[in-house]
Image (cartoon, grey):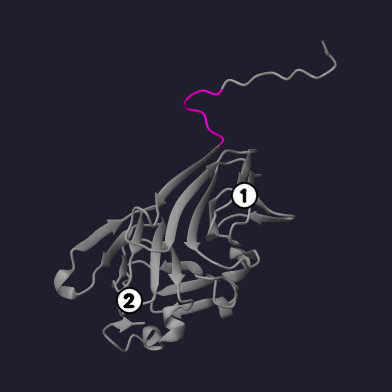
Amino acid sequence: MNTSKEVKSADLIKSEDYKVAYYEKTSSVNSNLNLLSYGNYIIKPGVISGEYFHKNEESLLFCIHGKVAVKIEKQEFILSHYDTLYIPLSTPYQLKNISEEEGFLILCKAKAAKKHVPFYSSWDVFSKDEKRIRHLNKKDVYLMFDVSEKADKLIAGYTIYQPFTRAFPPHNHNDQEEIYIFIKGKGAMEVYEKEENKTFVTSVNEMDAVTIPLLNYHPVFSQEQELHFIWCIAGERYWVGDKNKDFMTGKTDKITT
């Protein structure tokens, strides 16, 4: 018998233990969205994950808490507060939490056909770059992954509302579906096709999300504190205010793009 090999010890993994957890929140299978899926990663301090990839989908990671290194092929990107990372179609990636707190990442995915290149966007840099910011009445939009970046379907960013602010004018899209993910503060949201059938009216709190299928108006309202949310779009690649300037001026009652 060969006894020269090192004998390693076993691990006990209790039923409640985890190192990395992924929670699927919604997908095209269980929602009225055709392209978009969304979920959360939670990764414990010091943990290195296995390799993940998403067949037939391009992805965006948004870092909400912690500091996570993401390895994509031979590249490594360090994500911290509000940083984002585009992961190309069917490309393996690995996560490593390099902070002393749990890492919390949001993952949005969309069906795609072409492979592009990874793209990292730093919140510290982009939130100070006026080319990436759209200033509206009492709210600012930050374009973290815009049409200038290569992708099939995705664009995304953050919107920050001042207290007691509403979206105006209401708008909808015939060629984009969306997910709004609320990450700070509390507020309210409506989603409706027409005023007379406005039945989706709800309060929203931190880490609530709302899916927005095609042709639904989707105004948001903040309350007594700032309201931050991720908007992630799949479809034709434009931001509404860049396509229709009436959205920026508020000179119309509603907008369809």
**Residue positioned most to the left:** 196
x%, y% of residue 256? 32, 82
What whole-number distance in Å separates the C-alpha atoms at marks 2 and 1?
Answer: 35 Å
Q: Which residues are magenta?
A: 13-19
x%, y% of residue 180? 39, 62
Locate residue 116 relative to residue 159 in the image: left or right.
Answer: right
Q: Is residue 152 visible?
A: yes
Residue 13 is drawn in which quadrant? Answer: top right
Using the image, tell me which numbered label, if any, was put on residue 172.
Answer: 2
Circle 2: residue type? Asn
Using the image, tell me which numbered label, if any, was put on residue 163.
Answer: none
Closer-to-camera residue (8/42):
8
Which residue is denoted by mark 1 in the rendering? Answer: 67
x%, y% of residue 95? 62, 47
Please, what secondary structure does the residue beneath circle 1 have? loop
Q: Is residue 226 visible?
A: no
